[in-house]
Image (cartoon, grey):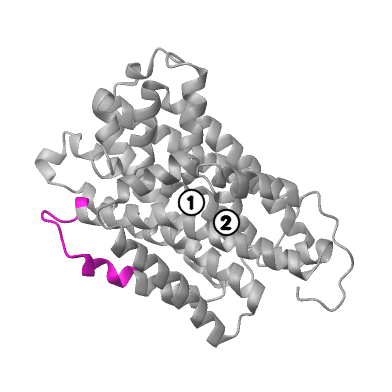
Amino acid sequence: MKIAPRQLLFLLACLTPLLKLILMPAQLAADTGNDLLLSALLLLAAESAAVFAAVLLTKRGLSLFALVERSFGRAAAAAVCTLLAIFFLFAAYIPLFEQKLMVQSVFYDTLPSDLLFAPFFLLSAYFCLKPIGCFGRIFDLLGPLAILSFFFLLLFSVGEADFLSLAPVGVTGAGSILSAALHTAAWAFDGALVLALLGRIEYRKGLAWKAALAHLAGGAAVLLFLAVFYGIFQDIAPVQFFAFAKTAKYFPAIRLLGRVDYLFIYALALAMVFASLLPMLSAAEMLKQTFGESKPRALLYSLLLNGAMAAVSSALVFAFPAAERFLTRTLFWLFPLFGMLLPALLLLLRPQAAKGRRP
């Protein structure tokens, strides 16, 4: 089953940007203050270029494993795909824990049991069993839902923002702006996600440009949210986590109608749940390409990946700030390496003719 171009565009424009709305705004505000838009712009531009390179690879009609195998052999292909699977496990950590913390903070008045989050791993385990090409229909459903929910939340919020708080531009300095972009690279791995879809995308002429523009459109929505976010919270922005669920509550009509914004918060959170699973699904896909995708093996991969993440969730239940800081400050280089540099390097490959290898 192939992912249609329309479904890929929904993924890049509507779903992957959602991962940048939970903790990343507060992180940027802490690092660069009112210059958070410049750091985000650098990051999103580089990520869109990586998406362009990755989608351009779909023109060859090969999976990532086959692409590397035809250039360097089976051992090299297995090594690259295995390393990418491990990278996706690292990339999955922050999105999954963001979801857990968001559910606990936004939807509950008191701290719920950790067992409440167990169904999330069951859902992840089930999805990891499925071929990644099957999720195109989900992109079709969640894409418009994300657009509608984001539009109304932004509509409720934009009137309360003081955009003059974003001036003067560049006051924190180029070094601080670049440093903040690097430290938020843990939320920028869309190029790597597209690599997991190679061989599963129905390529059409001009798709790479359309995908890059769709990703830029999603990035523009993120930038607009960041502007509204900082315009509302300003000096206290660095401690305003899960801000997408907070900005609309200052809308004057909320006092009369009640928290109608929760309808759109819940809808957006539903789309975020699937978006946060994308790294886990991609890790499972890499293992399937490398070691085979029979049903027993797919079950084994799913249990291993989700068991490992559940174990980490339990072990680091009170240590998320330290773990996040380790990923964003120490291992930040992993994300540009796999999410941006790898797609560009793969464009340089010139695969030899197939010799009975897997597609």
Q: Position of residue 5 (x, y in %)?
A: 63, 58
Q: Describe residue 349's horizontal placement relative to residue 197 as left or right.
A: right
Residue located 74% across and 55% down the image: 57
Depicted 284 relative to depicted 244: above or below: below
Q: Secondary structure at mark 1?
A: helix
Q: Amino acid at mark 2?
A: Leu
Q: How many marks?
A: 2
Locate the N terminus and report the quarter of the image it occupies: bottom right
As drawn, the label of residue 193 is 2
Residue 341 picture quarter: top right
The span picked out in magenta is 105-120
- Number of residues whose C-alpha sits closer than 10 Å to that of mark 2, classed few (under 14), some (14–19) or many (20 or more): many
Secondary structure of residue under mark 2 = helix
Confirm whether residue 291 shows in the render.
Answer: yes
Q: Earlier in the sequence, mark 2 or mark 1?
A: 1
Q: Which residue is mark 1?
A: 16
Residue 211 part of the magenta segment: no
Amino acid under disc 1 = Thr
**x and y percent of residue 275 in the render?**
44, 57
| Relative horizontal placement of residue 69, taking residue 64 as reference (left or right) | right
Q: Judge whether 290 appears above or below 295 on screen.
A: above
Asked if residue 108 lies in the magenta stretch, the reply is yes
Q: Nearer the viewer, mark 2 or mark 1?
A: 2
Residue 203 image offset from top left, x and y in percent:
72, 60
Looking at the image, do the residues carrying marks 2 and 1 touch, with CB atoms under 8 Å apart?
A: yes
Q: Is residue 198 visible?
A: no
* Closer-to-camera residue (144/121): 121
Q: Nearer the viewer, residue 16 or 3?
A: 16
Distance from disc 2 to disc 1, alpha carbons, whole Å, reads 9 Å
User: Circle 1: is it few (<14), some (14-19), or many (20+) Cα within 10 Å?
Assistant: many
Residue 308 on image: x %, y %: 41, 68
